[in-house]
Image (tube, helix red, strand yellow):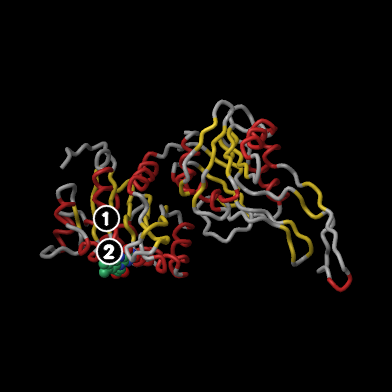
Amino acid sequence: MEQKNEKRKTIVIGITGSIAAFKAEELVKELSADYDIEVILTQSGKKLIEVEKFQKLCPVRDCLFQPGMTYRDYLEREKIGHISLADKAGLILVAPATANLIGKIANGIADDLLTTTIMASKAKILIAPAMNNNMYTNPIMRENTGKLKKLGYFFIGPATGRLACNRHAVGRLSDTGDIAKKARVLLEEPLKNKSVLITAGSTIEPIDPVRHITNKSSGKMGYALAETAKAMGADVTLVIGPASIAKPGVKVIEVNTAQEMYDACMQNFAGKNLVICSAAVSDYKVLDESREKIKKENNATLKLELTKNPDILKEIGRRKTSSQKLVGFALETENLMENAVKKLKNKNCDMIIANSQEAINSENNKVFIITKNAVEELEEMPKSLLAAEILDRFR
Ligand SMILES: Cc1cc2nc3c(=O)[nH]c(=O)nc-3n(C[C@H](O)[C@H](O)[C@H](O)COP(=O)(O)O)c2cc1C
């Protein structure tokens, strides 16, 4: 076991009863190079790993009430185990996290050492789910993760890949290297004292009271950027169009139309260190929005006249000061690089993220990062990791 150093931060790693529990050993090994690690096992987690392997690496606990301990022992000897663990944790990382564990935290249940420590801690909590795909897509699970995200809990994964039940589907524990990377970011906060404005999702342009024009953007990239920027310690404002995914726990301004998004951006962009425009903003709106529902009986054909919306990226590029950085996204169906390079120049951006239409509504993205001096091709990766790659360039 490594020598204790008082200055080292502590990560409490919770290991639950998932088939991926054995992978936590790699995490403990990797993170103990720089941090003090304390492991908490749930009773189910304990059944799926070789406890001795972990005991050789760090302190391991598995129960709230220890056999033979008296009231006085808890107060004097252990300083109440779960409270002292909760207080000294810089980060609590649950990897792998079962559906059961996530459900318990989301519903305020604290009936073992891990859930009680989480409940008692003010530390950041990072959850790495791993489970069967039907468990992960169960609406109860969706509701629980949505609730926790909104409350500021951080998630990584799960990834899509081969599951223990031999299906290729979502539910696999994220790569342990990626989990360790995110844990480090949460502890080190490389964007502390920076403020970031992010736009995400689509906008909608009304045709009449019950119809509108929109596009296929899901908002996942912008949400990943917002969540990651927050994890990196930034103060984040997210301007979002209508989107059906769980909102991250940052300041959120909800808008519908491109004009509303433009207004929200102009009101909030002053003083921001970094602005990332990832929203798919409608270029056009309907010139004469009908006050009543348009009836087909009166129209054999229907012509909609469209007029241009304000250009948010261009206007921020025009107004930004020399200390503000601006990132735009370019999505093209043809001549991607040529158009992206043009956009960088015309909109006075510091960086353009060029992606193709496969990015829409996908969990992954494959992009080129274009700056004045370089074009960098990144491999395909989950949007949360891409968000970290982008934000890392503005530390
Ligand atoms: C062999 C085995 C593998 C399991 N793998 C998972 C898993 O990957 N994810 C999950 O959510 N539940 C899994 N379960 C079910 C959980 O162990 C069960 O819900 C348990 O109550 C979780 O307790 P805990 O959250 O306190 O660790 C598995 C069960 C068994 C027997």
- Sort mark 2 into few (<14), some (14-19) or many (20+) by Cα contacts within 10 Å: many
Q: Mark 1 highlights which residue?
A: 83
- The yes-or-no answer for disc 2 within 8 Å of ligand 1 is yes
Is 152 placed above or below 110 here? above
The image quadrant in which ligand 1 is located:
bottom left
**Residue 111 appearing in the image:** no
Foreground of the two, 232 or 160: 160
Q: Amino acid at mark 2?
A: Gly
- The yes-or-no answer for disc 1 within 8 Å of ligand 1 is no
| x 54%, y 36%: residue | 369
Query: Where on the picture, by quarter, is residue 41?
Result: bottom left
Foreground of the two, 315 or 194: 315
Question: Please, which residue is most extreme toward the left here?
Answer: 68
Helix, strand or loop at mark 1: helix
Q: Quadrant of the N terminus?
A: top left
**Residue 243 appearing in the image:** yes
Q: Position of residue 114 (x, y in %)?
A: 28, 60
Q: Position of residue 127 (x, y in %)?
A: 37, 55
Foreground of the two, 61 or 160: 160
Q: Is residue 133 left or right of residue 35?
A: right
Q: Is residue 172 left or right of residue 306?
A: left
| x 27%, y 52%: residue | 24
Q: Amino acid at mark 1?
A: Ile
Q: Position of residue 390 (x, y in %)?
A: 50, 39
Q: Mark 2 and mark 1 in contact? Answer it, CB < 8 Å.
A: no
| x 32%, y 63%: residue | 164
| x 71%, y 50%: residue | 282
Q: Position of residue 344 (x, y in %)?
A: 64, 33
Q: Mark 2 highlights which residue?
A: 17
Q: Nearer the viewer, mark 2 or mark 1?
A: 2
